[in-house]
Image (cartoon, rainbow, N blue to C red):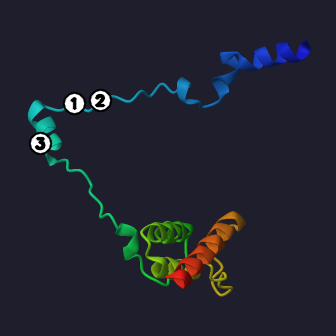
C-alpha cells in the first residue's frame, strides 16, 4: 500500500517542476508571420524529391575505409535490392564487401553486428545458389 502512495506522489505534477519536460516548457512555437505573397512564393518553390528506382545500385565498391555505420547499412540495402532485382552477381559483390573484416588500422571502422552478418552470409549463400543454377 505504501508503494501506491509513493507512486502517486511521483505522478504529482509538482514533483516534476525541477525537470525540463516538454509539457512544462513555456516557450511555445509561434507561427512565422508571412504575407500572402511570401506564402505563395514559398509554396510555389517547393518541389517533390524524386529518386531513381535503382538509386542503391550506384554505390561505389569497395566502400571507403574507415566505413561508418550509414555506409554499411546503405550497402546492405543495395545488396538486398539487387538480389530481389535478380542481379545476383552485383548483390554478391556488395555482400562480399560488407563481410570484409574490420580493419585494425582504422579504430573508427565499423562492422556489421552478429544478426546482420548472419543475414548477409545467408544472402551470399543464396546468391551462390542462384548463380550456380543459372
Q: CA distance from mark 3 to mark 2?
A: 17 Å
Residue at 71 percent across and 18 percent down: it is 11
Q: CA distance from mark 1 to mark 2?
A: 6 Å
Residue hosting label 1: 33
Residue at 70 percent across and 15 percent down: it is 12
Residue at 46 percent across and 66 percent down: it is 84
Q: Closer to the camera, 42 or 50?
A: 50
Residue hosting label 3: 41
Q: Is residue 110 visible?
A: no
Determine whether the residue tagged by mark 3 lies in a helix, strand or loop: helix
In this rendering, the answer to whether 61 lies above or below 83 is below
Q: Nearer the viewer, mark 3 or mark 2?
A: 3
Determine whether the residue tagged by mark 2 lies in a helix, strand or loop: loop
Q: Is residue 119 visible?
A: yes
Residue at 15 percent across and 36 percent down: it is 39
Q: CA distance from mark 1 to mark 3?
A: 14 Å
Mark 3: give few (<14), some (14-19) or many (20+) Cα within 10 Å.
few
Relative image position of residue 78 (x, y in whole percent): 46, 70
Residue hosting label 2: 31
Does label 3 or label 2 sit earlier along the sequence? 2
Determine whether the residue tagged by mark 1 lies in a helix, strand or loop: loop
Q: Is residue 36 left or right of residue 5?
A: left
For the image, the number of numbered tags is: 3
Mark 1: give few (<14), some (14-19) or many (20+) Cα within 10 Å.
few
Mark 2: give few (<14), some (14-19) or many (20+) Cα within 10 Å.
few
Q: Closer to the camera, 9 or 63?
A: 63
Q: Quadrant of residue 100?
A: bottom right
Q: Closer to the camera, 66 or 11?
A: 66
**Is the C-beta separation of discs 1 and 2 under 8 Å?**
yes
Relative image position of residue 72 (x, y in whole percent): 54, 71
Amino acid at each position: 500500500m505504501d508503494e501506491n502512495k509513493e507512486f502517486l506522489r511521483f505522478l504529482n505534477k509538482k514533483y516534476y517542476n525541477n525537470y525540463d519536460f516538454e509539457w512544462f516548457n513555456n516557450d511555445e512555437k509561434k507561427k512565422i508571420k508571412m504575407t500572402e505573397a511570401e506564402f505563395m512564393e514559398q509554396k510555389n518553390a517547393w518541389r517533390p524529391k524524386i529518386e531513381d528506382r535503382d538509386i542503391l545500385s550506384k554505390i561505389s565498391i569497395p566502400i571507403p575505409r574507415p566505413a561508418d555505420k550509414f555506409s554499411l547499412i546503405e550497402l546492405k540495402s543495395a545488396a538486398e535490392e539487387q538480389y530481389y532485382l535478380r542481379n545476383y552477381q552485383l548483390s554478391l559483390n556488395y555482400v562480399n564487401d560488407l563481410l570484409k573484416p574490420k580493419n585494425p588500422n582504422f579504430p573508427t571502422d565499423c562492422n556489421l553486428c552478429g544478426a546482420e552478418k548472419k543475414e548477409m552470409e545467408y544472402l551470399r549463400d543464396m546468391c551462390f545458389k542462384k548463380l550456380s543454377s543459372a
